Amino acid sequence: MWISQAPALALLLIHWVFGQKPPVSETGSVICKLQGTSAQPALSKQGDFLIGGIFAFHYDFILEQNYTRHPLPLQCTGRLYSRELRFARAMEFAIQEINNRLDILPNVTLGYQIYDSCGTLPMAVKVAFQFANGLDPGFIIDPSCQAVAKVAAVIGDSNSTPSIGIARLLGLFRVPQVSHFATCACLSDKRQYPAFFRTIPSDHYQAAALAQLVKHFGWTWIGAIRSDSDYGNNGMASFLKAAQKEGICVEYSVAFSSSSPQSKVERVAEIIRSSTSKTIVAFTNSVDIRILMEELTKKTTPLLQWIGCEAWLTDPEVLKFGELAGALGFGIERSIIPRFREFLLDLSAVQVTESPILQELWEDTFNCRLAQHQSNLDTGKGLKICTGTENLSAVNVPYTDTSQLRISNMVYKAMYAIAHAIHGVVCKDNENQQPQCNKNTVVQPYQVLEQLKKVNFTTNGYPVGFDSNGDPVPTYELVNWQESEDGTLHFVTVGRYDASKPKDQQFSMSRNISWMNKQSPVPVSVCSVRCHPGTRKAAQKGRPVCCYDCLPCGEGEISNETDSTDCISCPDEYWPNSQRDECLPKLVEFLSLDEVLGIILAVCSIAGACMVVAVAVIFYRHRASPIVRANNSELSFLLLFSLTLCFLCSLTFIGQPSDWSCMLRHTAFGITFVLCISCVLGKTIVVLTAFKATIPGNSIMKWFGPPQQRMTVVCFTSVQALICTLWLVLSPPFPIKNMSLYKERIILECNLGSAGAFWAVLGYIGLLAFLCFVLAFLARKLPDNFNEAKFITFSMLIFCAVWITFIPTYVSSPGKFTVAVEIFAILASSFGLMACIFVPKCFIIIFRPEQNTKKHLMGKVPSKSL
């Protein structure tokens, strides 16, 4: 029942607001009187059902209040915005079409009352009260009262803040409101605004689209301005939330409005001039952007790439600001309304005189005064009198501009939606027959509200319908301000945004964009330059995340993407290139025959072996000579054989390590060197025993004859062979990739397997060498002309010096040089043995044959200096 009492309840609400108690009649009925003076509609027409319209024809109002008399009614003032008048006339045109149709509300006439809200909340709320109450001076609330709201539905307002006030009031009585231009996302909340619908998408989607647009062109450092209103504040809040998700930073975010002091507008302009961002997102209405642009043009302002919202981006009156050339943003899809232009232009002087708002349009457009408005003051200003023959088709003003019908189509669709809703209440559709409508039906606003939730139709090719939040399907055109050849700016559609599609398909481009100052490349607006691959972003302390330094990746790390936040480590066997943007396989290093060092060592090894073979040939050819026979030819040939193996075993250290080469190189080295030292040790013992044998009665030689000498060599060598066998069985050497020595290289080397076994092999060689050195040192002064013990002493001295030096050098040498040091020690000690033991003998054999006699060797002939 309370729905039917909506007008009276609204009056009671007014009494409560002003602190007054409504009077009560003798019968107990409540008498309510309308407070204040009702405003007259700007445009109106009678009909069976009345539709309300609220548009912002002006953007200011006068309120005279001196608290000594009853205040005068609110009065809109300021210049007329003829674009808004075109919106209102789109409502008139739609109602005219509907009244002439036979498929929608046949035999039913829709009427309308259209008011000016001044773009302000007080006037909008006042008009909303009138729509709920009507213009009757008083009401009597009685149980038999069946009064309903004056209008079946309301279209408007053009701004979010007035629309919020209207929606809160009309929502109390469930009077449906359909807005054509209120985009605040807050209005989608059905708990607060249960009766609100709109044909324009919510700013929630526009904000997301703007964030995607800014991200698409790489603008990560932007400025943000907004109208200090519900529209601007809520729209910017949605945009900033979406921008944060896209990684966009805002240098500044400031608000102002047309009612702000001039000092605040100047401060906003100065912030814009002093900023470092080159892209600015403006979530303002058309009035506020004009005020700001007028202030910016007073001083030199850097070129900026403006990103706009639909509230001002497609407003023709803003096109006069050339500083906005190249502006980019989203607008409602451009449309065509057949015969609408003819309707707008079909105004005669008689029609104009019947409507104050049309009179104002006529006078402003043609800069004249209608006869009934002419005054002496106007004559003094030189204003001419309108003749009535003026032609609207000959002028270009926002009212007559139908090339970009965007918001006008939203009004057109809103009116058709309401008509379909009323049709659903008062008409019955019959298949293949004209609908039957009862225009005498009492239409309750809540019935229209329920029908509006169900509407789903297409008019002029444009779908109309609402989701559960009262919003339409969000689609936008990407609009760019481009300069034509004559220097004028015009709107060009360069892309599209459809929020109903998957995210990666919502945004599409259809043609080239003209940027600020006709720049061909996309403007750059970043706080910090992009970090190239090979570097990472490091946030600057106390600044937004878009402000950062580019630091090179650390050792072993790469980044292969631009603006990478982190560097990634290369796999173990890979290393970054010089740019540190790619992981390449590490250089594999080992001592090979393809490099100079390997070739030199291999040549020395083979040369040494060849020299030993040559010595063996010389000895063999002169095996019957005294010097060969005197030096134990059997041990000499065995020593030459072992030296050959010593030279050749160094070749096993050259080349890529493998399981077999690792096991062979150390064991072959250990056994051959022990065999070599054992032969030298045997020769030393032979020298000592031979001297002792010259003493009368001494029979030591029979205890150390050739069999014993061979057994000594076999025994000493067998010990080393046993050590090597245990080494290979228990923990053999194996190839490894050493990646700890060099970070950028892989060293292929042989792991010893058992370090103890390796040092046992070396220690045993060292022990035999030391023993041989001591014995040879003791025999160095024996009375022979050619005392071999002297040369053995020198050879052992060289051998021990080489291997003592080898140990620290081997431990400290890196990579392949470790192997080179070991080969060098093998070759040096082998050459030392051969040079000290065999070269003097070969010299005598070849160059001093006269000394190669038994007498000379026995000291019977005085020796000559070598």
Image (cartoon, rainbow, N blue to C red):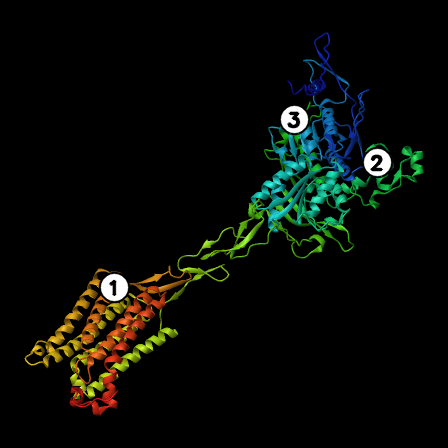
Does the residue at mark 1 contact the one at mark 3 (Cβ under 8 Å)? no
**Of marks 1 and 3, which one's residue comes earlier in the chain?**
3
Coordinates of residue 108 in the picture (x, y in percent): 72, 29
Q: Is residue 722 left or right of residue 63?
A: left
Q: Which mark is residue 360?
A: 2
- Dot 1 alpha-carbon crowd within 10 angstroms: few under 14, some 14 to 19, many 20 or more: few
Q: Is residue 425 visible?
A: no
**Of marks 3 and 2, which one's residue comes earlier in the chain?**
3
Q: Is residue 225 left or right of residue 353?
A: left
Mark 3 — residue? 171
Q: Which mark is residue 734?
A: none
Q: Nearer the viewer, residue 730 or 347?
A: 730
Q: Nearer the viewer, residue 117 or 298?
A: 298
**Of marks 2 and 1, which one's residue comes earlier in the chain?**
2
Query: In the picture, residue 674 is in which quadrant?
Result: bottom left
Whether residue 134 is situated above or below residue 579 in the rendered picture: above
- In the structure shown, which secondary structural element does the residue marked by tag 2 occupy? helix
